[in-house]
Image (cartoon, rainbow, N blue to C red):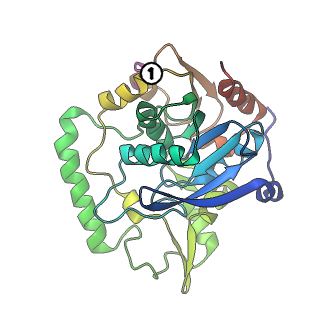
Amino acid sequence: MNMINVNSEALSAIEREFTLNVNGLDLAVTTWGDERNPPILALHGWLDNSASFSRIAPLLDQYYVVSPDLAGHGKSEHRSPSQAYYLWDYAIDMSIFVKKMGWDSYSILAHSMGTGVASILNSISKGIKRIVFIDGMGAPFTISEKDVVSHFKSALRLSEMAHSTKLNGFSQKNQPQYSSIQDAVKTRQKVVGGSISLGSAKLLAKRDLVSVESGYRWQHDPRLTIPELIQLTEVQAGCFISQIKCPLTIILGTNGLFVGEVFDSKSQYLGANARVCWHEGGHHMHLENLNQEMISEIKSSLSTP
């Protein structure tokens, strides 16, 4: 199987960036390709940023790939202390974003948490032609109905503890978390479901690190590292997946997060419009295991009538 490499020089030559105010927040946006081409909204995963698509987007050269850093992620602004980071809030942001971009129709390429955002966005935004999920099947973090109250209490305790102990980046904004970029990148190699290569970690870390006196720290909102007080139940998340009527392709990694019982529980909500494809790789397969077969699969899915 031939792996595909996109070198850093090529990336820097074709990437463009801009900032767009959405719902009162300045969102940092990365684009690839000609804006006259059919648009693709690329939605990254939890604690990632638009650099998540920096290897795959340049290969989708017949499209205009647009990836915002979701609120609180990467270079985008944080929500106010009175606001939270719920999936439906991201979806509302993206609905406004699409309108501001002036898109009458567009497709979605989403990874992990981004698939949950996409499933909700699909319910409130018109003009979505096709959707491609990469190692994601809607809301990634769900709870059972019987655990709603206990989860609320536990999440609140974790939030209070994080604030009081200054853990997980809740320290002062000028206080370093790492003495060097190398230390930060090594930490960034740890992801949900395992680890990623040093090269992939560098891509994600570069867009998330900020220099402070005597070191570096993450610029994403530390509140992202603790659970939200309210999470969708598995049934609620399934409802958003089942109402997707446009062509839906779900590309899952053989070593990803959606194998075995997890896949069985979520696949029951898929409609006749959904197609599941398995590829070798883990959760960040679009960064780690990019190959011609996967690219062909994605291009074919995006051109499905």
Element under label 1? helix
Specify whether 268 is left or right of 31.
left
Q: Is residue 159 visible?
A: yes
- Corner quadrant of residue 3: top right
First to last magenta residue range: 266-270
Residue at position x 41%, y 31% in the image: 123
Q: Position of residue 9 (x, y in %)?
A: 82, 59
Residue at position x 26%, y 66% in the image: 161
Q: Is residue 54 visible?
A: no
Specify whether 56 is left or right of 150.
right
- Corner quadrant of residue 265: top left
Location of mark 1 (residue): 267
**Nearer to us in this view, 96 or 86:** 96
Amino acid carrying mark 1 in the image? Ser
Specify whether 231 is left or right of 4.
left
Prevailing secondary structure class for the magenta stretch in the rendered image: loop
Q: Is residue 77 magenta?
A: no
Q: Position of residue 148 (x, y in %)?
A: 20, 40
Position above or below: 236 against 82: above
Other residues around mark 1 within 10 Å, as few (<14) / some (14–19) / many (≥20): some
Residue at position x 18%, y 34% in the image: 146
- Give the position of the C terminus as an image quadrant: top right
